[in-house]
Image (cartoon, rainbow, N blue to C red):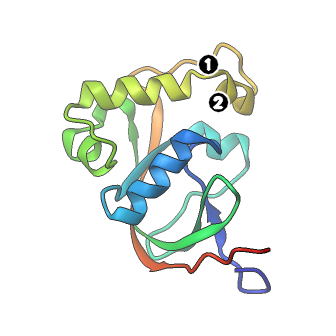
Amino acid sequence: MTGPHALKPFLLAFPGPLRDRLVAAVLSGEKVATTGLLVEYEVENEELPEAGERSALIDSDGREVAVVEITEVQVLPLGEADLRLALDEGEGFLSVAHWREAHERFWHSDDMREGLGDPSFVVDDSTMVVVERFRVVEVLQLRLDG
């Protein structure tokens, strides 16, 4: 979706196996929510998404694979994450504790800490997170160059 009406990218995790799994879960309809850190938006000087906003889901190869529409955005303390969110993330989490463990592992990774510019960054119950719920409105035909 290049040109004057290009959609902003919808990026899940970092390129690689985790992003590949998350993109597949979105395309299959299993993943209908994602959670990020509010501080990421602040560091990147990026505005929070709004309901109705559409973005291009990007795979690990940088290709636009689907158009997603934000249906709901919540900002809440990490300690208020609930089972519905854990299930809606579509990654097989059966408890909030399992969901949180996986997210903390990601948020405490070297890549995330580097991106935030804070090598000792840690989350706790009061860390503010951004929950985006979304739906796929269009799966894009992948063009194979070559």
133 with respect to 59 (left or right) = left
Q: Secondary structure at mark 2?
A: helix
- Identify which residue is drawn at 60% across, 54% down: 11
From the top left corner, tell me how far across and down residue 140 is, in percent.
55, 79
On the rendered image, what quadrant is the N terminus found in?
bottom right
Tell me where residue 71 sits by quadrant: bottom left
- Position of the C terminus, as image quadrant, is bottom right
Badge 2: residue crowd in 10 Å (few <14, some 14–19, many ≥20)? some
Q: Which residue is mark 1?
A: 121
Q: Which residue: 26% across, 36% down?
A: 93
Q: Residue furthest top?
A: 120
- Kindly identify the residue that appears in the image at 48 percent across and 22 percent down: 105
Whole-percent x, y for residue 67 in the image: 52, 75
Instruction: Establish if 99 lies above or below 143.
Output: above
Check residue 112 in the rendering and tell me which mark sits there, or answer none: 2
Q: From the viewer's perspective, tell me whether residue 65 is left or right of residue 130.
A: right
Q: Disc 1 and disc 2: Cα gap in Å?
A: 9 Å
